[in-house]
């Protein structure tokens, strides 16, 4: 770990090399990784010790870059034009071919995106040249950090570079607004006042609590990616013409479709591959996927949580 003040280029190079960089925004410090790199994004979850794959916010330098990644309707466009750069995150549909890692959006077909105003965050994003996925830079379940001392205390050696940008001016996370349907929905109160958002959209904003399709817990969102195929978890053998989502070395030969989350049995690598491999298997003509057991250690917890949700869909 190195703590630097102005070494934007070192931090940008670390991001491009798949490393973790903590950096200041005007809200709180973020734990950043290249949002287009599955393995780097997996490292964020691993460092935070998140038991679930909550979707992450991708940070970009300009509204134009944001609009290349997501589909902005009229309300989203107006909010972006009025309040970016700033402490606002918009949740919009992913654009087709969007380069953001599926793990960063936890398999959702939507994308949380933000253009921060902090000058150091702006310089970093510009120098990195890639969108940066960043949750708050604290261990899961702990307070959000507003100074480098908090980041060091909470995550210390789990971060490759800590960029010192001083104390965060706002000190609470960004306001999260969903722009996925007819109405804008307040998904999280934060740095932008609700009245400012309502002034831009010209009407009261819908609260997530009154909106069954956008439950506060994003893991429960109706739009959460669920495979069409049926998943059979903890499979020790293969039945019929099941496709196989494998884990670990020394697998028996399989004539059908098989993808291995991590041939070396590394749960971080498995997390990085999870959503992309589920998509590939689900796109095949297969109605059943056997998933081999994955240990509950480290990111294995989050992988198994996600797999259980995908297996217990209602249909
Ligand atoms: O101020 C902030 O927002 C900080 C700085 C670093 O930008 N970041 C932050 O990230 O607070 P995090 O991961 O702690 O919170 C992300 C929030 C969560 O409430 C998550 O549920 C929501 O954004 N979110 C992310 N993607 C979403 C999606 N596709 N749909 C709905 N909610 C989403
Ligand atoms: Mg947080």
Image (tube, rainbow, N blue to C red):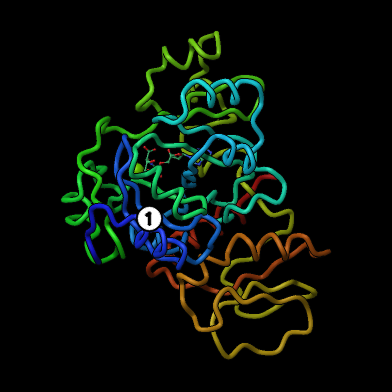
Q: How many marks?
A: 1
x and y percent of residue 136 in the render?
Answer: 33, 46
SS class, disc 1: loop
Residue with the mark numbered 1 = 50
- Near-viewer residue (234 or 217): 217
Q: Is 86 situated left or right of 94 in this image?
A: left
Note whether ligand 1 is within 8 Å of mark 1.
Answer: no
Q: Residue at x 56, y 59 (%)?
A: 307
Going 27% across and 57% down the picture, which residue do you hit? 162
User: In the rendered view, does 250 fall on the left or right side of 85?
Assistant: right
Question: Where does residue 189 sit, x and y in percent of width and height?
Answer: 38, 26
Q: Residues within 10 Å of mark 1 (few under 14, many from 20)?
A: some
Q: Is 193 on the left or on the right of 98, as rendered? A: left
Q: Work out which residue is located at the far right of the displayed protein and give it.
A: 285
* 87, 130: nearer the viewer: 130
As drawn, 215 above or below 54: above
At 25% across and 33% down in the image, what residue appears?
171
Viewport quadrant of the C terminus: top right
Quarter of the figure with the N terminus: bottom left
x, y (%) of residue 165? 25, 45
107 w.r.t. 70: above or below: below
Q: Position of residue 28 (x, y in %)?
A: 29, 40
At 34% from the left and 34% from the top, the residue drawn is: 173
In the image, 142 versus 29, the foreground residue is 29
Q: Quadrant of residue 292?
A: bottom right
- Ligand 1: quadrant of the figure: top left
Residue 170 versus residue 227 in the image, above or below: above
């Amino acid at each position: 770990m190195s703590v630097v003040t102005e070494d934007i280029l070192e931090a940008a190079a670390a991001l491009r090399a798949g490393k973790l960089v903590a950096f200041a925004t005007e809200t709180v410090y973020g734990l950043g990784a290249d949002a287009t790199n599955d393995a780097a994004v997996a490292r964020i979850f691993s460092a935070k010790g998140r038991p679930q794959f909550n979707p992450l916010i991708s940070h970009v330098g300009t509204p134009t870059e944001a609009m290349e990644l997501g589909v902005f309707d009229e309300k989203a466009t107006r909010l972006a034009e009025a309040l970016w750069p700033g402490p606002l995150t918009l949740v919009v549909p992913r654009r087709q071919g969007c380069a953001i890692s599926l793990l960063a959006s936890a398999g959702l077909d939507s994308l949380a995106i933000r253009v921060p105003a902090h000058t150091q965050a702006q310089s970093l994003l510009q120098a990195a040249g890639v969108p940066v996925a960043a949750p708050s830079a604290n261990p899961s379940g702990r307070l959000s950090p507003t100074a480098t001392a908090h980041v060091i205390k909470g995550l210390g050696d789990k971060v490759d570079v800590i960029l010192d940008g001083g104390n965060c001016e706002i000190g609470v996370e960004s306001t999260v607004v969903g722009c996925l349907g007819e109405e804008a929905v307040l998904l999280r109160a934060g740095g932008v006042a609700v009245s400012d958002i309502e002034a831009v959209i010209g009407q009261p904003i819908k609260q997530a609590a009154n909106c069954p399709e956008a439950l506060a817990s994003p893991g429960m969102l109706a739009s959460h990616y669920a495979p069409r195929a049926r998943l059979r978890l903890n499979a020790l053998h293969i039945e019929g013409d099941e496709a196989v989502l494998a884990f670990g070395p020394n697998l028996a030969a399989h004539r059908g479709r098989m993808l291995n989350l991590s041939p070396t049995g590394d749960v971080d690598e498995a997390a990085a591959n999870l959503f992309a491999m589920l998509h590939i298997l689900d796109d095949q003509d297969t109605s059943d996927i056997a998933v081999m057991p994955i240990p509950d250690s480290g990111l294995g917890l989050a992988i198994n949580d996600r797999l259980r949700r995908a297996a217990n869909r209602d249909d």
